[in-house]
Amino acid sequence: MALADGAIARACTESEIAACDIIVVCIPVLRSVNALRRIGGRMRPGAVLTDVGSVKATVVKAGQGAVPGGAEFVGGHPIAGTENSGYPAADDSLFKGRTVILTPTKRNTEGTLARVERIWRMAGARVLRMAPRLHDHVFAYVSHLPHAVAYALVHSVSTLDSKVPLGYSAGGFRDFTRIASSNPEMWKDIVLQNRKEVLGAVGHYRKNLALLERLIRRKDAPGLLAYFHKAKKTRDRL
């Protein structure tokens, strides 16, 4: 489909890909580790390997360990996308006005980072830098946890004995659970790759949900109001 649309000039094998100047790996993160190792070992000096995965610490370690001397791996994560996946969901304005996180280490040079940043800016994105482990901690809360909660909410409704008809779902349910239509393969990989941080985020969320439950049980109107006000104030800052 990409060839027919003129989106790519040609399709090629991994060995041919490894001969490119800049290579961007865009596959689920568990599979990307092995792909980075295979491709990285074939690259020539001066080439750049990068990725778009939502988990960075393990990927950066694998990528930087795979490339030969003179080549570099730069971890990347575009904060863009929808619940749709595959080539038919392609959108040429996907990255315009969006943020891309690069996760450099001491093994990266400014020249190589500038090359990768230039690609993303050409796509319309703004680029920020963040340490790999900090990235995984932050995105466990602002990305991985929300997806996990959305999947869990839809799962809880689908397993109800009363069989609530989804055709009657209100706007809140639809809006909140939109991301549960995301690619299950991709999200299985993400939560396993960032397992420790995601479990920490789930535990923290459980404490806050338990607090909400206690306020409701006690019929604590002032407590509920304060809880909701704090959440609204935080959300409004976005």
Image: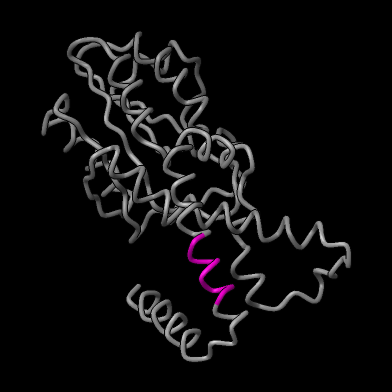
Q: Is residue 154 above or below residue 52?
A: below
View extreme (bottom): residue: 222
For residue 15, side relative to residue 107 (left or right): right
Q: Is residue 152 above or below residue 183?
A: below
Read off the magenta span: 207-214
Colour scheme employed for the rendering of this structure: one colour
Residue 172 in picture, x, y percent from top left: 63, 76
Considering the whole magenta stretch, tell me its main secondary structure: helix
Residue at the image point whose x is 28% and y is 22% from the top:
21
Q: Is residue 215 above or below residue 46?
A: below
216 in magenta: no
View extreme (left): residue: 110
View extreme (right): residue: 162
Residue at the image point whose x is 33% and y is 61% from the top:
97
Residue 232 in picture, x, y percent from top left: 42, 80
Q: Is residue 127 above or below residue 154?
A: above
Q: Is the N terminus in the top left, top right, bottom left or bottom right quadrant?
A: top right
Residue at the image point whose x is 82% and y is 72% from the top:
167
For residue 136, side relative to residue 3 (left or right): left
Viewer-nearest residue: 123 or 134: 134
For residue 96, side relative to residue 112 (left or right): right
**Residue 67, quarter of picture:** top left
